[in-house]
Amino acid sequence: MPGSVSVPASADNAAPAAVENPGRSRAALLMAGSCLPVLGAVLIAPVLPKMQDHFASVPGAKTLVPVVLTVPALALALLAPFAGVVVDRLGRKRLLVVATVLYAVFGTAPLWLESLGAIVASRVLVGIVEAAIMTCCTTLIGDYYSGRVRERYLALQTMCASASATAFFVIGGAVGSAGWRAPFWIYAVGLLLAPAMAAALPRPRATPSADEPAAPARPFPVRRLAGICALTVFGAMVFYTVPVEMSYLLDDLGVESSGLIGLATALASAATVAGSIAFTRLPGTPEGRLPALFAVCAAGFLVIGLSGSPALLIAGAVLNCLGTGVLLPSLLTAAMSRLEYADRGRGTGLWTAAFFFGEFVCPLVLIGLDSALGGLATAVGALGVASALVAAGMLSARRLRR
């Protein structure tokens, strides 16, 4: 398998060397680690009303309780670039194991914390360690694999994250029936993953693979990543619009059945997974197909914006999510292709920050568009127009370069 690595006898950042297949168990651990930030984003969403009732007497609770859900994503977006610097200096594996243990400690803290302020603070700490976990897992995929094999694992990372979001939402709701604190126990899974990561993950060594020749020492390539990171901020907004807004869009059309809303969300999630699977089978380069993918996402948004029935809205959401399922691994692969070993931690941290910043601002942008345009569906349609303009702009820029 191309781009694999062997277990060195020395530190994470040791001198170059070549390798053997890292194995499916190691890939499974990296996929599981990549799902931990998703768990933090959706697990407690079903119990927020119960938490709101519990802290009803606390001043500012109406603002602070929703922040418990969203603040890890903001912390992750702000700190992922710094996590990337630490990854490159201290080593990927060591930081991943420590961060996974801390994830369990900080994640379960609300089980015994009584102050809402302290709970919010613990969630900030969760976001910090999530930044380290996500950066380490993605960087290690880049270290262990190259070429088409790397593309497949980056697509699998997206697929696992999308599927786990739906699963964690259901699990959080089921466990939450025992009380609003109960879902926080699930964060203890980090204590199971950390020893497995320590035992099964090899320390990567800075050896370039056959298709990734070594380069002389040079400054970090900020300009090379600036464009793809800016595009990723917008791509993250495109990616998260349907999962975040689907229930509100259906509610605006008079759909009150939680079963139908759940079915629509599941169909959209399945479309994202299908897109991630299709990513590895599509011709051409990941970067070369980005204009077409933004055009597909735009078409889905425009169908949603013009829909007058739940069936048409769901059809638009499925079309959009097919596009986003391919879009996310394409953006990530395009970023990874610009990075060599010495830069990969910092570069992955910047890309991760761009993606989660886009996730954080997505609902804020849609709220602003909703207020300005007089409807959420119209706001989504406007985002579709913006996506189409991005696709057209990329095609024009490509023609000019040629």
Image (tube, rainbow, N blue to C red):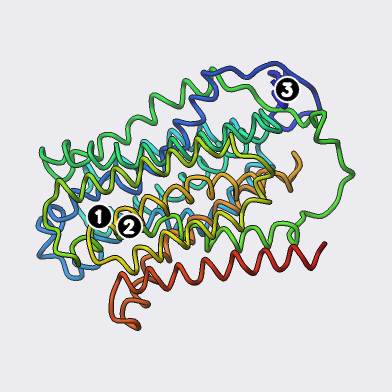
Taking the image as shown, residue 273 lies to the left or right of residue 344, namely left
> Tag 1 or tag 3, which sits nearer the N-term?
3
> Tag 2 or tag 1, which sits nearer the N-term?
2
Indicate the position of residue 263 as horizontal and vertical percent values.
Answer: 22, 44
Can residue 313 be seen by looking at this rendering? yes
Indicate the position of residue 17 as horizontal and vertical percent values.
Answer: 80, 23
Which circle, 2 or 3, is nearer the viewer?
A: 2
| Quarter the C terminus occupies | bottom right
Label 3's element? Answer: loop
Which circle, 1 or 2, is nearer the viewer?
A: 1
| Quarter the N terminus occupies | top right
Specify the farthest residue to the bottom.
Answer: 372
What residue is shown with label 1?
311
Q: Is label 1 in contact with label 2 (beta carbons under 8 Å)?
A: no
Local packing at callout 3 (Cα closer than 10 Å; few below 14, some 14-19, many 20+) is few
Residue displayed at 35% across by 83% down: 372
Query: Distance between the Cα atoms at labels 2 and 3?
Result: 45 Å
Amino acid type for the residue under numbered disc 1 = Ala
Indicate the position of residue 92 as horizontal and vertical percent values.
Answer: 62, 35
Q: Is residue 31 above or below residue 337?
A: above
What residue is shown with label 3?
10
Between residues 357 and 154, which one lies in front from this camera angle? 154
Indicate the position of residue 58 as horizontal and vertical percent values.
Answer: 15, 65
| Rendered image quadrant of residue 245 | bottom left
Taking the image as shown, residue 386 lies to the left or right of residue 317, namely right
Label 1's element? Answer: helix
Can residue 346 be seen by looking at this rendering? no
